[in-house]
Image (cartoon, rainbow, N blue to C red):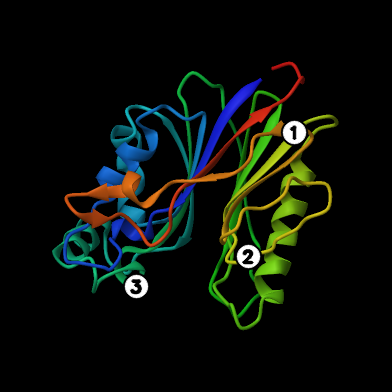
């Protein structure tokens, strides 16, 4: 098994620095153009969930909504697109999504809250394909208190491990909001706050896209760069 796994916090389709125009469709098309096996997305506006399949060229989409939009999706989408730097998740809601190459049979394993009550809702969601559990998370942004995202990463690991069968590989990907999420039994993290951790299989070194690869019309797409690696396993599919 050789699977390309990619993760990207798409920043609601905004650029860095934010401008009036959004580039969400371009981001999804760019991240899926080479047909990764699994693409984990964070900070997706809820209105866009039904469009991810088309934008990704027919890939399978498994969403997890963390915040419902204030207004109906068409109106939220119109208002958000009118000024991306001003309107964000308060109107459009927020979601994560696992996008899978259509050739793979996918089992949706559901989602669970990893943030504590009283804090903004943060979720982990997971799917199974080819004897591997892929979990996608977006931990709380609290750099002053790193124990908070660290605990959320721990809960995400527990969720993924609780769904894995004996001998299955686990891949934990997403925006950890943590620079050193070392988790026992998993591969080494990357240098930033976006990571892909692997347990039960070999993996290539985590690579971060260079800035030039996410330029569109002179604008830098998102305030995060995509990260990716390949998972290699002897487990039969």
Along the polypeptide, which appears first: circle 2 or circle 3? 3
Q: Find the distance from the CA under tag 1 to the CA under tag 2.
A: 23 Å
Could you tell me which residue is drawn at 63 percent across and 40 percent down? 205
In front of the other: label 1 or label 2? 2
Q: Which quadrant of the view contains residue 231?
A: top right
Write down the residue under mark 2: 179
Write down the residue under mark 1: 169
Residue 114 percent coordinates (x, y): 66, 63
Q: Is residue 211 left or right of residue 120?
A: left
Q: Is residue 105 left or right of residue 182?
A: left
In the image shown, does 95 or 145 lie closer to the viewer? 145
Say few, some or many: other residues with alpha carbon within 10 Å of mark 1 (under 14 / 14 to 19 / 20 or more).
many
In the image shown, does 195 or 209 lie closer to the viewer? 209
Judge whether 56 appears above or below 162 on screen.
Answer: above
Q: Is residue 165 left or right of residue 120?
A: right
Q: Which quadrant of the view contains residue 74?
A: bottom left
In the image shown, does 190 or 177 lie closer to the viewer? 190
Q: Is residue 92 left or right of residue 103?
A: left
């Amino acid at each position: 098994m050789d699977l390309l796994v990619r993760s990207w916090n798409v920043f609601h389709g905004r650029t860095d620095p934010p401008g009036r125009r959004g580039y969400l469709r371009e981001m999804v098309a760019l991240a899926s153009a080479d047909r990764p096996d699994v693409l984990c997305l964070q900070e997706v506006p809820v209105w866009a969930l039904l469009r991810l399949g088309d934008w990704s060229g027919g890939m399978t989409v498994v969403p997890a909504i963390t915040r419902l939009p204030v207004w109906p999706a068409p109106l939220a989408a119109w208002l958000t697109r009118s000024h991306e730097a001003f309107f964000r998740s308060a109107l459009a809601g927020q979601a994560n999504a696992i996008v899978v190459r259509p050739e793979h049979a996918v089992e949706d394993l559901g989602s669970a809250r990893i943030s504590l009550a009283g804090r903004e809702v943060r979720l982990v969601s997971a799917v199974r394909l080819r004897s591997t559990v892929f979990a996608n998370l977006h931990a709380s942004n609290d750099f002053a208190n790193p124990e908070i995202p660290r605990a959320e990463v721990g809960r995400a690991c527990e969720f993924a491990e609780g769904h894995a069968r004996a001998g299955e590989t686990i891949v934990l990907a997403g925006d950890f909001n943590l620079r050193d999420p070392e988790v026992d039994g998993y591969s080494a993290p990357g240098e930033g706050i976006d990571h892909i951790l692997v347990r039960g299989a070999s993996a290539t070194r985590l690579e971060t896209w260079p800035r030039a690869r996410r330029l569109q019309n002179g604008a830098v797409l998102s305030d995060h760069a995509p990260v990716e690696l390949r998972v290699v396993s002897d487990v039969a599919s």
